[in-house]
Image (cartoon, rainbow, N blue to C red):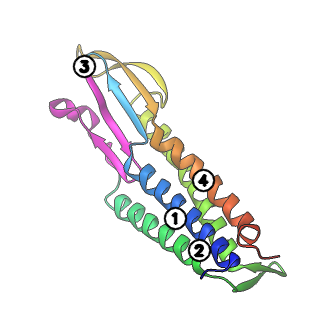
Amino acid sequence: MLIKSDLRVWLFRSLILAAVGLILISWFMPWWSADIEELGISNAVVIHPWGLANNMGGWGFYLAGSDMPVWFAPVMWTYLGLAILALLVGSFIRDKSISLFKRKINLSNLIIIVVGFSFIVVAVLAVVVAAIRTGDFGLHLLGDTFVSMGYFEQSWVSARLLPGYWLTCAVGPILIVLGILRSKIIGEN
């Protein structure tokens, strides 16, 4: 029979697993999308955490040079795997501490907080890089932009951040809070 402290530990682990679920959901959802009115293409360009999807069909030549570097997708998938592994390890570590800045810090708390902070960094960098890349094509990251696609083709392009991005923005702070409250949740100190 589980004692009360074991139940609290499993509650904490369940919260971490729920956060991992949110991470996976956000990772497979698109983060940004652009519709091209004149061509009647919804989600003509979609940005995922691991790269860009060009759904413009024969009109795709307008996006020549927009692809991310070849190494980008493998790095992002590796980051996801390492982040999930770190969270799982962090949820099972119990009595390990390290000295950092002349203070003893619980290793589990630190791992979870660092992963949470890394998701905040990824979300911020995603917007910065996307704004730069869309600017290279004369688009605003958010809202409507009137663009000339060459010759006589002109259109309004409507761009927006999608729920997958906002979910990622929420996961980082959730993990930081879980890392900070870990000792209280599991009943230590």
Nearer-the-camera pick, 79 or 12? 12
| Image quarter of the C terminus | bottom right
For the residues labelled 1 and 3, say whether their Cβ atoms are less than 8 Å apart.
no
Residue at 42% over, 37% down: 32
Residue that protrudes farthest toward the front in the picture? 1
Residue at 49% over, 45% down: 129
Q: Badge 3: how crowded within 10 Å, few (<14), some, or many (20+)?
A: few
Indicate left or right for 29 with 117 as reference.
left
Nearer-the-camera pick, 52 or 10? 10
Tell me the residue that label 3 is attached to. 40
Tell me the residue that label 1 is attached to. 17
Indicate the amino acid at tag 3: Gly
For the residues labelled 3 and 2, say whether their Cβ atoms are less than 8 Å apart.
no
Indicate left or right for 109 with 21 as reference.
right
Tell me the residue that label 4 is attached to. 120
Residue at 33% over, 25% down: 35
Please state which of the two labelled residues, at mark 1 or mark 3, is closer to the viewer.
Answer: 1
- On whether residue 43 falls in the magenta region, the answer is yes
Please state which of the two labelled residues, at mark 3 or mark 2, is closer to the viewer.
Answer: 2
Quadrant of residue 31 within the rendered picture: top left
Please state which of the two labelled residues, at mark 2 or mark 4, is closer to the viewer.
Answer: 2
Tell me the residue that label 2 is attached to. 91
Q: Secondary structure at mark 4?
A: helix
- In three-dimensional space, the C-alpha distance between marks 2 and 1, rounded to whole angstroms, equals 9 Å
Report the span colored magenta. 40-67
Location of residue 98 with respect to 72 vertically, above or below: below
